[in-house]
Image (cartoon, rainbow, N blue to C red):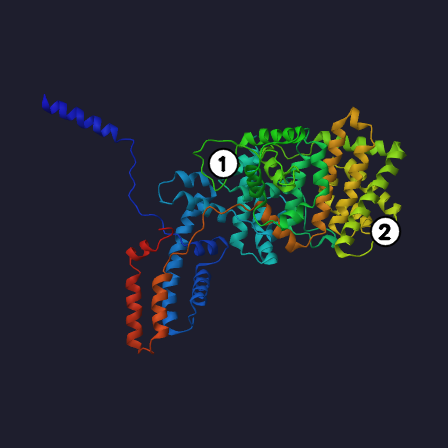
């Protein structure tokens, strides 16, 4: 009887441990610089030489000395070992959800997110070359030509190509918002999610940056990202809750200048400002922010989801600055939050219909035309007078009605044809030819362009019968003008300024800063001793190398592992 009871207990114990998985291992040793070089497409020998050169430059050692050349073999062996590990992680990084659930490598959560962020990084030159092309297997075989033209290693080109192709296929299989898919399925940080959403938006509408006309030859990827962000947020979503005052503020302000002068990331600065001030505000602002909060509610999730950063559940509420003026959210910050909840990236049909109605209205009513011309000229005079006051000079402006007429005609023509796929694909060229070139005769800076379009918005919103009958038409035309203004502002901005502005828009406070912990510490000690000591005979040098090799035991590697 005792034997049978013992057997039953033993059987229950076996059943209890039947579904238990026990893994015994050490944390994976990952060197950040080696991973960055691997992601960039470098070979193991190139990465080893690059790491060794940077190491010697940092510590002030002579890279061609005997001790240094002997130490290079350790860098090469360490880099080859790292690259073998990265090749094993390649399949898991392509499916970030598997990386979280796998049991083969012990990788901390913050390190996983850092690896994913680096693995899904984008090169602007490659994005510029791929936009407008179908990401097919045939194009992947021709990436060697793209690599030679852009200077990006072929391995890196294939990695980015596969990432974009994987994302497009994932979005086609679901009806969820693109931002939600990229954040949950690919575990990307919010800044990288915004960049990818802009790239996918341009790719879906087949925008081509390679075949732009000569005057747009310097239209870089950062400018395309910013224009896509504005068009995605303003022209895709039916902004029925955007009050006219908010749109007029966005039409008047210089959003790029605000982003370029931002000491802290734009989105974080708006969130911090709203959290530190009171909650009072006008009814229009309350309506606006309540709509933004309802959009962001789609992104709410449980606290178990691990990301570098997440959109807060409570959006910025209307507040007042110390001067008593309402602190409005920046355009780029609002668009970045808005596109997170958009499910489709097609143009708003109501916007297209409203723009056609506006064109017919302008053709039928000459009084509204004259009122808009006067308002555009008046705002331009104010902008130049303001600039002249800062420079303590005088301003002389003569009215150029023909340029104003050509500008308005171009805007109405682009708006009425916005529903055409081809016309929308060529919007950058049309803006430059139909709006930008006429504006050059009367406006030469970003501030003057904003003033002219702001005047058009004032003249239309104040002198139209749509204010009483169809308020949505006024709102649609204003948000179309805001998008036009921001695209023109990007064209009048240098690539360096645009890159700085885009980094300020998408950047968030870093939550993880990897530190280089590898074989550098023991090598630095021995090289420093070799440099400061008297020249050693060959036998002493070989002994130092043997001692250095002894220091590279598994215990030393574990002590200098990543994040230990």
State left or right for residue 559 relative to residue 153: left
Query: From the viewer's perspective, is residue 177 above or below residue 390?
Result: above
Q: Which of marks 2 and 1 precedes in the sequence? A: 1
Residue 337 in the image: x percent, y percent? 59, 37
Callout 2 secondary element: loop
Query: From the viewer's perspective, is residue 554 above or below residue 315?
Result: below
Residue 454 in the image: x percent, y percent? 77, 41
Callout 1 touching callout 2 (CB < 8 Å): no
Q: Is residue 176 visible?
A: no
Residue 315 in the image: x percent, y percent? 57, 34
Numbered badge on residue 353: none
- Residues packed near mark 2 inside 10 Å, few (<14), some (14 to 19) or many (20 plus): few
Q: Quadrant of residue 267?
A: top right
Numbered badge on residue 184: 1
Q: Is residue 473 visible?
A: yes
Residue 465 in the image: x percent, y percent? 82, 28
Residue at image point 88% right, 48% down = 400
Q: Which residue is mark 2?
A: 397
Query: From the viewer's perspective, is residue 210 above or below residue 335?
Result: below
Callout 1 secondary element: helix
Q: Which quarter shows the N terminus?
A: top left
Query: How far apart are labels 1 and 2 at the CA level?
Result: 55 Å
Residue pushed farthest front? 323
Q: Quadrant of residue 525?
A: bottom left
Residue at image point 52% right, 49% down = 159
State left or right for residue 512 relative to residue 534: right
- Residues packed near mark 1 inside 10 Å, few (<14), some (14 to 19) or many (20 plus): some
């Amino acid at each position: 009887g005792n034997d049978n009871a013992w057997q039953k207990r033993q059987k229950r114990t076996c059943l209890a441990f039947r579904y238990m998985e026990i893994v015994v291992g050490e944390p994976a040793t990952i060197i950040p610089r080696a991973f960055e070089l691997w992601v960039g497409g470098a070979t193991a020998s190139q990465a080893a030489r690059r790491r060794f050169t940077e190491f010697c430059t940092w510590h002030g050692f002579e890279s061609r000395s005997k001790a240094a050349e002997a130490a290079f073999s350790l860098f090469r062996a360490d880099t080859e070992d790292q690259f073998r590990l990265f090749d094993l992680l390649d399949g898991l990084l392509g499916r970030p959800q598997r990386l979280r659930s796998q049991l083969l490598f012990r990788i901390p959560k913050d390190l996983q997110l850092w690896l994913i962020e680096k693995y899904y990084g984008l090169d602007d030159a490659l994005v510029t070359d791929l936009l407008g092309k179908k990401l097919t297997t045939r194009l992947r075989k021709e990436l060697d030509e793209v690599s030679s033209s852009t200077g990006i290693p072929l391995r890196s080109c294939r990695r980015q190509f596969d990432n974009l192709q994987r994302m497009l296929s994932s979005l086609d299989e679901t009806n969820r918002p693109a931002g939600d898919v990229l954040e949950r399925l690919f575990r990307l940080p919010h800044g990288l999610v915004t960049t990818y959403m802009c790239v996918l938006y341009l790719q879906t509408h087949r925008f081509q940056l390679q075949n732009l006309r000569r005057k747009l030859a310097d239209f870089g990827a950062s400018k395309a990202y910013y224009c896509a962000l504005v068009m995605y947020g303003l022209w895709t979503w039916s902004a029925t809750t955007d009050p006219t005052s908010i749109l007029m503020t966005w039409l008047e302000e210089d959003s790029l200048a605000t982003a370029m002068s931002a000491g802290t990331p734009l989105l974080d600065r708006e969130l911090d400002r709203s959290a530190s001030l009171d909650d009072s505000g006008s009814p229009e602002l309350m309506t606006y922010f309540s709509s933004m909060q309802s959009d962001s509610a789609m992104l709410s999730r449980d606290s178990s989801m691990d990301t570098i950063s997440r959109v807060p559940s409570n959006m910025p509420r209307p507040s007042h600055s110390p001067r008593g003026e309402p602190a409005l959210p920046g355009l780029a910050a609002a668009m970045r939050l808005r596109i997170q909840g958009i499910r489709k990236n097609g143009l708003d049909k109501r916007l297209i219909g409203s723009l056609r109605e506006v064109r017919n209205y302008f053709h039928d009513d000459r009084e509204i035309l004259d009122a808009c011309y006067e308002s555009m000229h008046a705002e331009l005079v104010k902008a130049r007078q303001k600039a002249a006051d800062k420079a303590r000079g005088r301003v002389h402006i003569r009215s150029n009605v023909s340029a104003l007429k050509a500008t308005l005609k171009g805007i109405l023509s682009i708006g009425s044809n916005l529903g055409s796929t081809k016309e929308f694909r060529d919007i950058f060229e049309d803006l430059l030819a139909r709006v930008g070139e006429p504006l050059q005769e009367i406006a030469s800076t970003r501030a003057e362009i904003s003033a002219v379009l702001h005047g058009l918005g004032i003249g239309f919103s104040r002198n139209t019968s749509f204010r009483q009958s169809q308020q949505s038409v006024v709102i649609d035309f204003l948000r179309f003008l805001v998008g036009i203004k921001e695209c023109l502002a990007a064209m009048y901005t240098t690539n360096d300024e645009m890159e700085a502005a885009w980094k300020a828009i998408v950047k968030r406070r870093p939550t993880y800063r990897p530190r280089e912990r590898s074989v550098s510490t023991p090598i630095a000690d021995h090289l420093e001793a070799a440099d400061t000591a008297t020249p050693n005979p060959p036998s002493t040098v070989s002994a130092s190398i043997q001692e250095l090799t002894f220091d590279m035991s598994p215990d030393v590697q574990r002590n200098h592992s990543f994040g230990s």
